[in-house]
Amino acid sequence: MDEDITDIMKIVVALFITFVLVFGALFLYSGMNKPLTVVESGSMQHSDNESKIGVIDTGDIVVMVKPDKKKITSYVEGYHNGYSKFGDYGDVIIYYRDQGNPVIHRAILWLDWDPISERWSAPSLKYFDNGRWKDDNGINKDYNDLKGTLIIEGLGWKGYTASINLDSLEKHSGYLTSGDNNYYFDQDKGISTSRLIDHSHIKAIAGIEIPWFGCIKLYLNDKNISKIPDNSLPCLIVAIIDVIFFFLMIMTITNCYYIWKKERNKG
């Protein structure tokens, strides 16, 4: 009986060590004390009612990365160098807004404001598709002297066109941001008022998606359940079963090892 209890304790210890190693790696990767966040809206989905692995959907968990651990690549820069994350060009950031929960949206374009010359510029537009952006300069485009309304076409999975009146923005440099499932810039529809997102506003960079498991929190809190994609719940159930079987498999293998070791020592 004592040997059986000892074997069980060894299995428990092995599972605990596995748990500690996994979460230790998670904290090292993230660099944050609270590395996980649950997505509560559908603004980043690439479908109206279907969850997809590799895309940020309602009910997903996102592993956040501390901003100083990674250089942010905007959508426009990613279009040029081929870098993509979560189904589209550029990085997704988590930023603070004036009221409400932080927003998790894509960094589209960094706009520079020069207080001396009092003009806007966006050097990364130099390498962007010239036919997909325009401002009030018309055919005489100059990314070093943007004027009036800036328009960028073909954004998100729907290929929408977004525009922003530069004169309506607060006069400081920062990112234009947008949700992949929206049809506008955050700065145009009041999500971040008229404020561009500079580095002081950024809480984290989205690093890894853990699909469906955040639905548990949403169901428990009875929050935004109607926004959860139709296939998320069945996928979550299958994923939970897989996790249970994984731990049962680890316990079985560990137990078989100790039985084999015991029989070997007897021989």
Image: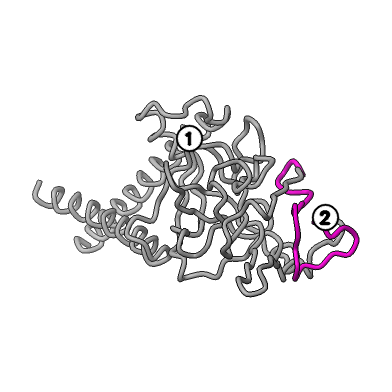
Q: Main secondary structure of the magenta part?
A: loop
Q: Quadrant of the C terminus?
A: bottom left
- Residue 125 disc label: none
Say what secondary structure mark 1 lies in.
Answer: helix
In the image, 9 versus 20, the foreground residue is 20
Circle 2 residue: 132
Callout 1, which amino acid? Leu
Residue 161 lies, with reference to residue 95, above or below; the image says: above
Which type of secondary structure does the marked residue at label 2 adopt? helix
What number of labels is visible?
2
Nearest to viewer (mark 2 / mark 1): 2
Question: In the visual, does 110 lie left or right of 25?
Answer: right
Instruction: Give, as a single range, the part of the protein colored magenta.
Output: 132-159
Q: Residue at x 85, y 64 (%)?
A: 141
Q: Find the distance from the CA under tag 2 to the CA under tag 1.
A: 39 Å
Q: Position of residue 118 (x, y in %)?
A: 66, 68
Q: Which residue is mark 1?
A: 236
Residue 180 or 38: which is nearer the viewer?
180
Image colouring:
one colour
